[in-house]
Amino acid sequence: MKKMQLGFILLAMMILAACSMEAPGSSSEEESGDGGEASGDYTIGFSVSTLNNPFFVTLNEGAEEKAAELGATLTVVDAQDNASKQASDIEDLIQQEVDLIMINPVDSEAVAAAVESANSANIPVITVDRSAAGGEVVSHIASDNTAGGEMAAEHLTSIVGEGAAVAELEGVPGSSAARERGEGFNKIAADSLDVVAKQTANFNRSEGLSVMENILQANPDIKGVFAHNDEMALGALEAIEASGKDIAVVGFDATDDAVKAVEDGRLDGTIAQKPEMIGEMAVEAAVQSLEGEEVEASIPVELELIK
């Protein structure tokens, strides 16, 4: 009987010893483990200049779709074309400790301080469509706005002829898009067109309408118009059609409304920026950067003339 008891005790001790050989925490759950943050498991803040513009709506949709595909969380805030609100929105994202902030600036100069705040918080920044005049950014994803402006001037010249009087509707003052598109347009127009009027309409359709009405009163003989975006172009087109004049209009962005207007023969052309692709590429660059991969400082997106 004692031998049997001793046998049971020895057997129990062997079982306990075998169990103790597995190190604490070495279960299959531990082996799959956290291993740090999983690929794509990031929170990305996205400050958009305005979601009241079809171009940026499409850009945002592209970003959201790509974020969902990569498993990242995209927190979107709408600056409503207000530089002060954008600064406040970015500070909120910094307080939320997001992993990276993508910024589509309202004003390239004004946003610099917010970029610097993100830098101070060690939160990387990517600019989208419009650049920042200060602070450090990982990458800038945008079309070549200067080349697009040149393309618009060349196309408008081909319609109205050398030396024709034209007007230019400018975007939000201080935005890199307005500055660069204007530079490109005027680089060509200086030798081929007579730009008799320039006025900002803040990338807004209703302002494009009212500004164009004023330009037509002061310059009734203009033959063409270049607008820095399609919203202003479509507003200008309304004013021109109401006046009964035959004036060529070229826009920029290739929004759905503008492309339809081109197809209907009302708008004479628009420069396609492919906003959905810009949004997709921005999120891809953001995740790559967070994964520790090298990202190009400037990532261009192809332009196309729609006519």
Image: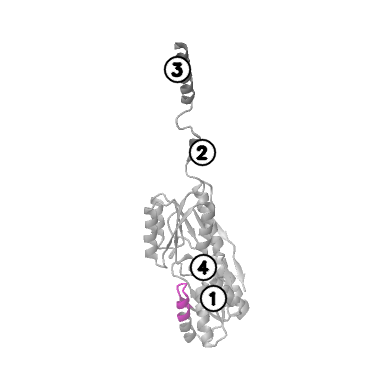
Q: CA distance from mark 2 to mark 1?
A: 58 Å
Q: Are marks 4 and 2 in contact (CB under 8 Å)?
A: no
Q: What amino acid type is highlighted by mark number 1?
A: Phe
**Residue 121 horizontal side relative to residue 291, left or right:** left
Q: What amino acid type is highlighted by mark number 3?
A: Ile
Res. 297 in view: no
Q: CA distance from mark 1 to mark 3?
A: 94 Å
Residue named by callout 1: 226
Is 139 in front, or is 31?
31
Query: Which of the marked residues, 2 or 1, is nearer the chain's N terminus?
Result: 2
Note whether 223 is above or below 38 in the view shown: below
Residue named by callout 2: 32
Question: Which mark is drawn over residue 55?
Answer: 4
Looking at the rendering, the stretch of residues picked out in magenta corresponds to: 198-210
Give the class, few, some or many, for how many residues have Cα within 10 Å of label 3's Cα (few <14, many ≥20): few
- Looking at the image, which residue is at 50% across and 66% down? 57
Q: CA distance from mark 1 to mark 4?
A: 17 Å
Query: Which of the marked residues, 3 or 2, is nearer the chain's N terminus?
Result: 3
Tell us which disc is closer to us: 4 or 2: 2
In the rendering, at what x and y percent does residue 6 appear?
45, 14
Give the class, few, some or many, for how many residues have Cα within 10 Å of label 1's Cα (few <14, many ≥20): many
Q: What amino acid type is highlighted by mark number 4?
A: Phe
Q: Are marks 1 and 3 in contact (CB under 8 Å)?
A: no
